[in-house]
Amino acid sequence: MKKLWNLGIILALCGLMVGNAQAGDDDIRLKPYVLALKSNGDFNEIVASTKEKLANAGFEIVGEYTPYETAVIIVVTNAELKALAAASEKGGFGAGIRVAITHVGEEVQVSYLNMGYIFHLYRMDGEIENVVQQMESALGMEMVFGSKEGLEIKKLRDYRYMFAMPYFTDLDELEKFDSYETALEAVEKGLVDNSAEVTKVYRIDLPGKKETVFGVGIKAGDGGDAHVMNVVDKEDIRSTAHLPYELLVSGNKVYALKGRFRIAASFPDLSMGTFMKIRSAPGSIKDALKAIVEKK
């Protein structure tokens, strides 16, 4: 019993206690990312080995994205995560795990989303512990990062950057179609037609539910991935796994998270001064995503 108690204390201090917010757990603090490892090895070899580790651990690789020369992002999911997403309202936003390999100077960093953080941020239902443990077993865990103090679970589940900023539920409804199937067709076609501005990274269909999430890379403009990250991602350990953005088809409607929520949640310690440097990015991101499904 003493060993279990000590283990619980260690996990809490590391910010990795996840799952349902039970009584007494609301003050646990979580951070958005996990650093799996740092290496001086060959970048391409580390990308290849990361994919192999994920596949061997039973994860399905659904997409890969190179937002700029120094980074590769791999997006994975599995049956358990898809089932959790399907059981949650707009849970599709949390159906994929973004894994980043980033070249920083002479160092290569492998990091990924802390799915406990995402689970609570997106107000998901059920238990996420198994998925968190599977990721840690597959890639490792040196430290959690992305916020100096972390965010309490009760604040994560009701997160907004500051007064008058959006909550998770304040989604951008981008377009409405006659049916779920018509909406999916429109997204697929729009991603092709707008390939000069955006790129399709992945698609995850949720089981037993008319809900599908697409990962979308944004190539240019004030909301372009490289432009935004060049401003906000300045720490020694990079938060590359912020990318890409999501486009959610739920029923016959297409939604996106508001940029001011999505960026702030990925960089919760971001100063208002830095935020102001990308003040036009949220609108630009919305415009890029809306152009994919906008009816001509």
Image: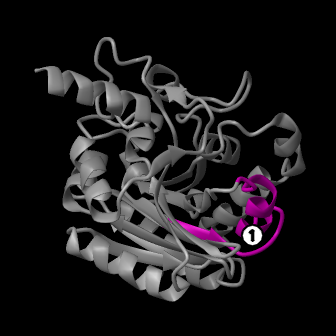
Where residue 224 appears, as percent x and y from the top left, is: 75, 67
Q: Residue furthest left?
A: 1
Where residue 204 appears, as percent x and y from the top left, is: 35, 66
Compared with 36, 168 (above or below) is above
Q: Quadrant of residue 242?
A: bottom right
Q: Nearer the viewer, residue 53 or 105?
A: 105
Q: Is residue 218 magenta?
A: yes
The residue under the point 44% across, 25% down is 153
Placement of the C terminus among the 4 image quadrants:
bottom right
Placement of the N terminus among the 4 image quadrants:
top left
Where residue 201 appears, as percent x and y from the top left, is: 50, 75
Label 1 belongs to which residue? 226
Give the crowd class for mark 1: few <14, some 14-19, many >=20 residues within 10 Å: some
Where residue 56 appears, as percent x and y from the top left, is: 21, 75
Q: Nearer the viewer, residue 271 or 15?
A: 15
The residue under the point 71% across, 84% down is 196
Q: Quadrant of residue 12?
A: top left
Tell me where the magenta segment starts and ends, as one range.
215-235
Q: Mark 1 falls on what kind of element?
A: helix
Compared with 252, 117 (above or below) is above
Q: Is residue 225 magenta?
A: yes
The residue under the point 59% across, 67% down is 293
Q: Nearer the viewer, residue 291 or 279?
A: 279
The residue under the point 66% across, 44% down is 267
Q: Give the total number of marks visible in the rendering.
A: 1
One can see residue 54 in this view: yes
One can see residue 209 in this view: no
Q: Amino acid at mark 1?
A: Ala
Left or right of 218? Residue 4 is left
